[in-house]
Image (cartoon, coloured by chain):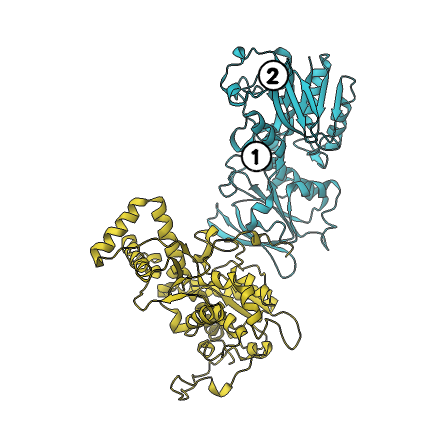
Chain colours: A cyan, B yellow
Amino acid sequence: MKYAIIGAGPAGIEAASVLAAHGKEVTLFEKAPSPLKNIADKAFLFPNFAPADEMVQTLDKKLQNELITVLYDTEITDLSRVALTGTVESYGDYAATMPQSSFAIPSEWKLTDAKGHTYFANKVLVTTGYTPFDAHRKEELGYGIYKGIHTSIEMEKMIRHKLFFLMIRRPPRRIVFLQCVGSRDEKSGNHYCSKVCCVTAVKQAIEVKKLLPNTDVFVFYMDLRMWGQGFEEMYRQSQETYGVRFVRGRISEASGTFDGRVQIKAEDTLMGLPMKMTTDLLVLMVGMEASEGTRQIGHSCNICGDYGFIHTIDPHLQDNLTSHKDLYAAGTCKRPMSLTDSVNDARAAALAMLDS
Amino acid sequence: MQKRYWNEYQKDIADDRYFYERSCIRQTFFPGSEAAFLKILREELGKDICDNPHQHTCTGIGYHSDVVPLETTMTIVARLFSLMKECGYENYVPSCVTSFGIFTEMTVKWEHNPELKEKARQYLWDACKREFEVPANIAHPSDIIYKFRFDLKPRMKYQLVNRFTGKPLRVVEHIGCHYAKIFPERGIGNAEFPYVLAGMIEAWGGEVVDYPERRHCCGFGFRQYLVQENRGYSIANTKKKFQSMEPYEPDFIVTNCPGCSMFMDKWQYTIAEMEHKTFDKEGYGIPVLTYEEMTGLLLGYDPWTLGLQIHQVQCERLLDKIGIRYNPDEKYKGISGRILPRPLKPECLRV
């Protein structure tokens, strides 16, 4: 039995390690030259501020297993079922309408990469993950136009490398975080919540205050979704211990000022008043979107769901199964989720692959 | 500014055979602008544009002030379209930005609610036994000048360059709200970074001033100035814009909306009277031009034929910067050749 996993992120690596622990040979396909692209530049993880490096090292170690083969620079662009006789059969829509039990033609998965190489596997797990929302699309927020406007991804790098006060001439007097950029947003077409931005902003705000206690930090939000264990406590700590200030309201416009700062306009919806503020840094908490790889596999196998994420059979009890036999999905290729949830989901997917 | 993503937003603009609709107020405040536009199209670009004398208001100001009901506006719009049909044209070009918004709004409404379009047909027939067709293309005149900006450039005698320093003139561009804020996809450059005037400025040698309150209202909000008690809001908005642009020391302002030109020009006088404050260093105020006036000046049209003497903030210093030749003795010369009386000078704003 050959197992293939597309995507060497946290979910892919975790699933591979579970399968290997059960004695299965696994091949991981990763389009980048190294694994864990989305978390490689993170500084600390919420809610316990564990260094992200530790997580990266732990996951990396899991790859050091003789049953796991990782193929880097290998982008899988097409997935199709191949009858064991060797003929490629296009099941596409037909497969989507068939119950799994009736899908009895002996076949396996054929994976084709961008260079035209083909690989074969009996079971395939999709962990192609997410891509951060492109903040250029919210042009009213001035990203890529004015200096001093960054995404949460860039902010994480700045915190990790302690760069953000070197990027401007003097340490910032004020930093503003804006939630829900590209999430819960009509203009960008993403109506869903990206789930991790609220707590990430709280985490980054605390990290900023630890490094620069004299900097004023504001967080503009619609409502704060502190859903995970320890999140609410972090939110409280950010205010009581670190003096982070939270304003309920979205920023409608950001522009550059004459002295190279950023002017923002917003409405404080608790006060019912419009407000204007000047800041040194504006951090846009960008949401998650289905990655290009996720969209490609979704279209290729006709398992593309809402917003380009992978559609699974049932969100409650069969959340790792797709409408195709022996094709599974885990992690943020299905919907936005935290790192913890993504890893747990990958374990569940691995067990589902072993069960069937 | 690091990048200019608004360049990616474009729209379809007809090439020729336009039906022109004049503004209610522009000929009072900027009497040479519409004539200049017609001249530019006919004589510089060789285009066919119809200027029908039977036209009338679009009801825009009344409609947005809630004193004219939708049915009336639809009927009025339908009649204007019927004039276009009667003349054999299908590309509608309303001079006023609010009219552009009204015509766009009605056609979009009719597209989504065909029953409203049928009602408009019936109202028009009942009122004056006329029939109309929806235009194939609706474009604002500034769209057309933008479209042909590179065709006009070789014909221009001047550039937007300070002849004393050799540097580009710093130009504040202001877009009327109804140009792109109602239907962002119908404006060149969308609503956040409209490019229609910026494109002209850059093509003709100037530099666009990107100041924080660039998108803020000019103060012509209909409910702000129509109700006398609310006029404080109007002038407060204008003042906010001027305070924001002041550090950039703009050489002039160009707009594509009748109201924006009027308020940004005339409120400078009012602010000077109220607070003894002007927004240029020497107390003359910042000249405000319409895009037709700007184009006409660069093409070498006479400033007084363009009607610049009617402006509140006087433009001679700007003309000198560009190097435009003019005869100061003819500033108040009427069409009959008689020299008209000179207006009184304001107390605070230098002229």
Chain for numbered disc 1: A
The quarter holding residue A108 reads top right
Residue A311 drawn at (x, y percent): 54, 25
**Residue depicted at x 75% and y 50%:** A166
Q: Considering the numbered disc 2 on the image, is that residue within a helix, a strand or a loop?
A: loop
Residue name at image x 27 percent, y 48 percent:
B118
Rendered view: B293 above or below A16 = below
SS of the residue under disc 1: loop
| Front position in the image: A159 or A139 | A139
For label 2, the crowd category at 10 Å Cα-Cα, with few meaning under 14, some 14 to 19 and many 20 or more, is some
Determine whether, in the image, residue A196 is placed left or right of residue B237.
right
- Quarter of the image with the C terminus of chain A is top right
Residue A334 visible, this orientation? no
As drawn, B318 above or below B215: below
Which numbered disc covers residue A194?
1
- Relative to A282, residue B250 above or below: below
Q: Amino acid at mark 1?
A: Ser
Where's residue B32, x and y in %? Answer: 43, 74
Q: Position of residue B276 (x, y in %)?
A: 51, 75
Residue A326: assigned label: 2
How would you rate the neighbour count of disc 1 (Cα within 10 Å): few for under 14, some for 14-19, many for 20 or more? many
Pick the quarter of the image with the N terminus of chain A: top right
Q: In the image shown, does A311 or A133 lie closer to the viewer?
A: A311
Residue A210: image tag: none
